Image: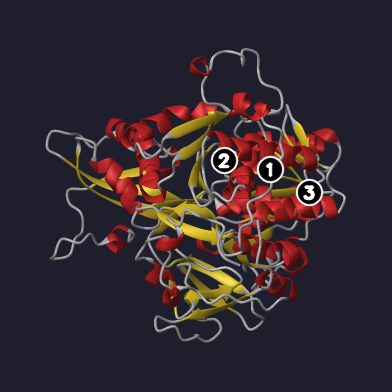
Amino acid sequence: MSSAQTDRFVAERLPPPGQWPELLYDLPELRRLQTTPQLNLVQVLFEQAALHGWSERPLFRSPSLTLSYAQAQDRVSRIAQVLTQDLGLVPGNRVLLRGGNSVGMALAWLAVVKAGLIAVATMPLLRAKELGDIIDKAQPRVALCDAALLDELHLAQGQHPVLESIVSFQPSSDLTLAPLGSALAAADVPLALEFLAPTKNGQFDACPTSGDDIALLVFTSGTTGLPKAAVHSHRDVLAACETWPRHVLQATPEDVVMGSPPLAFSFGLGGLLIFPMWAGASVYFSDRPYTPQGMAQLMFETGATICYTAPTFYRQMAPFMAEEAQKRGHAAQLRLCVSAGEGLPDATRQLWREATGIEMLDGIGATEMFHIFISSPPDQVRRGAIGQVVPGYIAKVVDEAGSEVPHGTVGRLAVKGATGCKYMGDARQLNYVKDGWNYPGDAFTQDDDGYFFYQSRADDMIITSGYNVGAPEVEDALLKHPAVAECGVIGLPDEARGMIVKAFCVLKPGFEGDAVMVKTLQDFVKASIAPFKYPREIEFLARLPRTETGKLQRFKLKTP
């Protein structure tokens, strides 16, 4: 079937077919997707809910709002009408989304994709410069933004006029009843979904996209700090539903899902939106950022049965889970705890099991692959291993030439399956895909039973508390401070966070490398880029190790 997306901006910037990964559709459910020409991801999810009798079951829950599948579909259609009728967007246009994990953010994402537009979700912590880099690459005309996060986006818009309109939304709003004052003249009220959506009737036919039409761009910083846009089609996301969620997670309509990974991450998007909808489950969104103690309390109060977060958070939550269980006289209703985003230390796995009685479900995935491709169910866990390859994928450990190494030997992980990497307009495609295989950039070993054991990152990416941080991006931020002459940034192993960001700085004459300067530089970085990227340790040096040609020898900084 031909594309329904008249705006071909992204399609024309895909890598040439010879650089694409080989996709495998070996499972019967994947073959059905391959032979279905028309696929709109959101239409499929809501039609499946109706077919299985889930329409009146709760889909989204928050402290102030609960929406059934049918109610959510009505709100999604209203937003889609705003996007196409009021804002004049056509299929293939990109829409930037800015918000935390909330009902409002989830509805906005679904509406964009239902309308045949391309969702470009961004993390709420990003600053104007980082948002500007994404706007430059994705060229969105419209942004949907949480009302509390408008300031940085307005700053970015001022520098990037291609972003014509910003429409705000509230994290929890019914969208069927306009707030008081909506009768004011249009010039007197902001562009807000709370004013626009109630004027729509919710009658909106999903855009008849083909399976190959693009549903989303997911931005990842990469080791260079320059954002890469991973492209995923409607078929890609539905194919991901038929692999790890079907064969390993096995969620049910009775499940209540909650967690911390942002919807702007593919880990969060899959775990906290797409996969629960695919299973008929419901999702709980808090109205404030999670703390370890707060999430532990909410696990009991909401009856959550599935949790997604990073190992760091599980480790911090463990004592509070035990405390809550003792205080209430019963365990939480949790049955599945998914860990991804960074390596899971065995000590954290054991600590969580002691506190909750639950064996953690570990997994490794990639933004470029959309979600998890190596993972084993809790009853098939092998100590120290992430798991076995997920049905729908194949994986191997190889040397630099791409030849498989003997079991027990450290090498590079290569993966092939139902999804794969396609960067938009980026030469780094050649680094990620070689001979049809995806190379996520991780060093692994494999045992004789097919279990994969994570060793380290094969590049300079720093993964701290589940967040990816490119060292050059932090270096760039530090170098903007008037006291810094040179700097080098690395990741250090850390028991609590997996890794931490450490900076080595050479100061200009007249500046003192003391505790005051450490805090000054840390605060400067927090104000310049997303705060989680700041260096938790700063060491001052007289000079940095460099080659004769002046290239920073980062490996020497990593050697004590």
Q: What residue sits 42% from the left and 55% below the top? A: 9
Q: What residue sits 49% from the left and 30% below the top? A: 149
Kind of residue at disc 1: Phe
Residue 353 visible in this rendered orientation of the protein: no
Q: Looking at this view, is 547 or 367 the one in front?
A: 367
Q: Are the residues at dot 2 and dot 1 in contact (C-beta closer than 8 Å)?
A: yes
Query: In which quadrant is the C terminus drawn?
Result: bottom left
Tag 2 secondary structure: helix
Relative side of 262 to 222, left or right: right
Tag 3 secondary structure: loop
Query: Marks 2 and 3: which is nearer the front?
Result: 2
Kind of residue at disc 2: Thr
Instruction: Please tell me the numbered disc located at residue 204.
Output: 1
Mark pair 2, 1: CA separation: 10 Å
Instruction: Please tell me the numbered disc located at residue 84.
Output: 2
Question: Mark 2 packing: few (<14 Cα in 10 Å), some, or many (20+)?
Answer: some
Kind of residue at disc 3: Ala
Q: Which callout, 1 or 3, points at the residue further toward the start of the chain?
A: 1
Q: Position of residue 287 (x, y in %)?
A: 65, 30
